[in-house]
Image (spheres, rainbow, N blue to C red):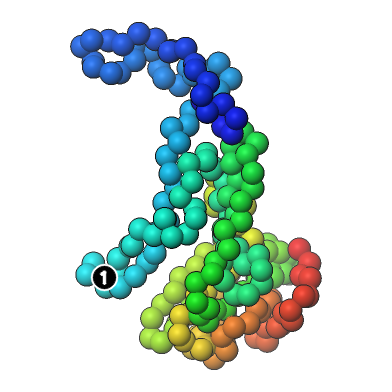
Amino acid sequence: MSQPSDRKARVSAPGKIDPSLGEFWVETPWEIFQQGHNLSCYERKRVYLNVPGKVRGRDFLEISHLTGADNDSDGRSVVAGDFRNNGQLDLVVRQVGGGPVILYENNFPKKHYLKITLRGKPGAKAPTSNRQGIGARLVAMVNGQQIVREMYPVNSYRSQMPNIVHFGLGEQTKVEALKIQWPSGLVQVLKDLPADQHLVVEEGNPKPETVVPGQIIGP
């Protein structure tokens, strides 16, 4: 039952079936882990596309068979990031039990985006935030609508997201206003930010730094 190599392995039952309970085991089924195996039922992965719909104007379309991601490997860790530095979020999936690391490239038609790296100023006299701005809340005003992001890179099981805040802008070519509420309590507002760029925003500094292609950003 352990992936990736033991597809046909058999593991002894952790107990006897109680006729009064139907197919439920008397003992806990989690005892299977004490035998050195992980439980995998080889369910196929699912990918959903957010599309216009009747519910709140949006709906989800199941497109797994079109993406190549509908395999039955036992994926556990998932990381979304712009690994090709083209403004589109790709997915990296890590399999349990030593299976392959898989990169799913985002090949949808390119849209506009804005990427933000935060830089807190720890050590200053006034109350300041941590270096990476973890815990900050960002609200982008785009074409009269709000897009909300929070800076929490550790938000996936056994994996960590990049410390870059990504805004997908669709057909819009700018962010009218970006409001940043830093962990220190400072509220910072940047206005009229053109799309398709990566900015480093320092806490309290009204002039963000533009990241050029290939530039390495320090921690």
Q: Residue type at mark 1?
A: Gly
Q: Residue furthest bottom?
A: 192
Residue 87 falls in image quadrant: bottom right
Residue 179 visible in the displayed image = no
**Residue plotted at (23% across, 67% down):** 55
Residue visible at 59% across and 41% down in the picture: 95
Residue labelled with disc 1: 53
Instruction: Tell me the residue at 51%/89% (across/down).
Output: 173
88 with respect to 65 (left or right): right
Q: Nearer the viewer, residue 45 or 123?
A: 45
x, y percentage for residue 132?
Answer: 68, 64
Is 37 on the left or on the right of 18, as rendered?
A: right
Compared with residue 180, is residue 62 higher up or lower down, i.e. above or below? above
Q: Is residue 90 above or below residue 70?
A: below
Q: Can see residue 90?
A: yes
In the displayed structure, would residue 191 be above or below residue 27? below
Q: Would you say 131 lies left or right of 79 here?
A: right
Residue 144: image location, x then y, percent: 38, 86
Q: Quadrant of residue 13?
A: top left
Q: Is residue 216 left or right of residue 106?
A: right
Residue 100: x and y, percent?
Answer: 64, 44
What element does badge 1 sit on?
A: loop
Along the line of sight, the residue nearer the viewer: 177 or 194: 194
